[in-house]
Amino acid sequence: MGANEFERRRWNDESWAALWPRRERLTDKVTEYLLAALALRAGERVLEVGSGGGKAALAAAEAVGGKGAVVGADLSAPLNRLAEQRVSEAGAGNVMFCLADVQTDTVEGGPFDAAMSQFGVMFFDEPIVAFSNIRAHLKPAGRIAFACWQSSEQNPWFFAPAIAQFLLPPPEPEPGKSSTGPFALADPEQTTAVLHAAGFTQVDRTPHALEVEAPEDSIVDEAQLVFMGVPEERLSAAKVAVDQHMQQFRIDAQRSRFPLAFQIFKASRPLLAA
């Protein structure tokens, strides 16, 4: 199996990708924390890893100004199309997107002053290989900052445990591969070790917690349950389980309040790195 084959199939599923604007409502507020950590300067060139629908890239493009540039890379063709549409509508001339898996591919436009990712780096099935490739795209003394989730226990909005009984257990990773998913980088010590093994130095991690008000379908809806593998004959029971789980967050019929526990990692490429 090739690099990130499971994630490649998932993120290129048109129905899954069509739900992405809903999902963004949960995480849009994280962008300001990510950009504050990255401290972009006018004229810098930025690589965004897992650029999704392009909203964070547009925010970074504003920070680096017309003499700077942002290149977003994502392995999802439908999300790339959404990002390109948004850039066109915004009239931003210093942003471009490419279809690429940054675990293995070379992204044109480098070397970059900085790399960034907003919940895009947890889906590499060989994380050391992936972060090594990201490092290779940076200038000496270039920097990376990325947002990833803290543990699932600290993010009770994550509903998967409520429907575990309706799903087949996930397959074990192939030899040499790592498990992927939203909480793959949740362990601070493990993630720090991955970054060091990939050749980064000056690793720093800052935890954050905030609350976001958003519609419930920002997180879960029937289409997502089907996509996750809930069989049709058990769909009604799964929806009841999800409803019971999500009651704790509801403000009213239209809005819920979700606690988000995430973390920002920062690191640097050594000045004299190969």
Image: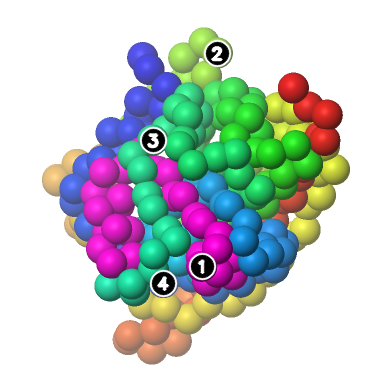
Query: Cα distance, mark 3 to mark 1?
Result: 24 Å
User: Magenta residues, as a range?
Assistant: 60-88
- 153 left or right, relative to 253: right
Per the rendering, the mark at residue 21 is none
Q: Amino acid at mark 3?
A: Ala
Per the rendering, the mark at residue 176 is 2
On screen, 9 above or below 65? above
Q: Quadrant of the C terminus?
A: top right
- In this rendering, which labeled residue sits more in front, label 3 or label 2? 3
The spot of residue 118 in percent (x, y) is 54, 55
What residue is rendered at 45% in x and 66% in y? 58
Q: Amino acid at mark 2?
A: Gly
Q: Can see residue 223?
A: yes
> Which residue, given by chain and number where applicable, does mark 1 sit on?
66
- In this rendering, which labeled residue sits more in front, label 3 or label 1? 1
Residue contact at pointers 3 and 4, CB within 8 angstroms: no
The outermost residue toward the front is 67
Per the rendering, the mark at residue 100 is 3
Q: Nearer the viewer, residue 146 or 1?
A: 146
Query: Cα distance, mark 2 to mark 4?
Result: 35 Å
What residue is rendered at 19% in x and 48% in y? 14
Q: Is residue 137 magenta?
A: no
Q: Amino acid at mark 1?
A: Gly
Query: Cα distance, mark 3 to mark 2?
Result: 22 Å
> Which residue, given by chain and number where applicable, does mark 4 sit on?
25
Density class for disc 1 (Cα within 10 Å; few <14, some 14-19, many ≥20) is some
Density class for disc 2 (Cα within 10 Å; few <14, some 14-19, many ≥20) is few
Helix, strand or loop for disc 4 = helix
Q: Nearer the viewer, residue 170 or 244?
A: 170
Helix, strand or loop for disc 3 = loop
